[in-house]
Image: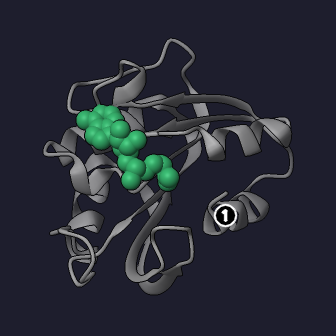
Amino acid sequence: MNIYLKKLIKEKFIKPLKVLDLGAEDFLDVDHLRQLNWICEGVDINNGVDLEKYFLSSNYPFDLVFSNYVIHKIKNREQFAKIIFDNLKKDGWFFIHTFDKTDENSQSVLTEGYLYEILSNQGFRNIKTKVFSFYDNQENHKRWHKILEATGQK
Ligand SMILES: C[S@@+](CC[C@H](N)C(=O)[O-])C[C@H]1O[C@@H](n2cnc3c(N)ncnc32)[C@H](O)[C@@H]1O
């Protein structure tokens, strides 16, 4: 599971609640969180949810909405921010990981400033962004990335 997401959960939540993963792919994070007693939903284009279109889960609102390595693939990023916002409970937290523009191994055009702007325009508060280097040690990956992280609250 994404260790930075795990850290946010440890800091912000005292017990397992309800979580939504946008772009869940193989549901690894979802499965891990389910084992920790979170009530989980994961969506992906592979299970019929196209996040280029507006999406409000029938299970909303969630205490935590996260999305790892998806937003750089999405064209309508303002709407993506709205999807996160609308699926969250008031005071709920979001967590985004994506690749920064300076990442030589991805084609991302996203910068910290741009991501901050669309999230604050959406109405999120306590937004924090950072860029850091991370070595992806997974089989068939084995490369450095520049990760862009954003967290914040509705
Ligand atoms: C690099 S994978 C990341 C998967 C997972 N979140 C993780 O951290 O390992 C990107 C995922 O985004 C999904 N995706 C890409 N475009 C999408 C779209 N328009 N709507 C929904 N999911 C999309 C892909 O199907 C894929 O599962």
The residue depicted at 77 percent of the width and 35 percent of the height is 34
Q: How is the image coloured?
A: one colour
Residue 80 position, x and y percent, is 28, 41
Q: Quadrant of ligand 1?
A: top left
- Residue 16 vertical position relative to residue 142 in the rendered view, above or below: above
Looking at the picture, does residue 33 appear above or below residue 109?
above
Answer whether residue 127 is visible to the viewer in this image: no
Q: Residue at x 64, y 45 (%)?
A: 28
Q: Amino acid at mark 1?
A: Leu
Relative to 35, residue 146 above or below? below
- Residue 2 lies, in percent from the top left, at 62, 61
Left or right, 70 with respect to 121, comes to right
Q: Is residue 45 left or right of residue 59?
A: left
Q: Nearer the viewer, residue 53 or 26?
A: 26
Of 28 and 72, the residue lying toward us: 28
Check the image and name the residue furthest to the top.
58
Camera sees residue 134: yes
- Where on the picture, by quarter, is residue 138? bottom right
Quadrant of the frame with the N terminus: bottom right
Q: Is residue 1 above or below residue 123?
A: below
Asked which quadrant contains residue 31, the reply is top right
Q: Which residue is mark 1?
A: 8
SS class of the residue under badge 1? helix
**Image spot of residue 17 (x, y percent):** 76, 36
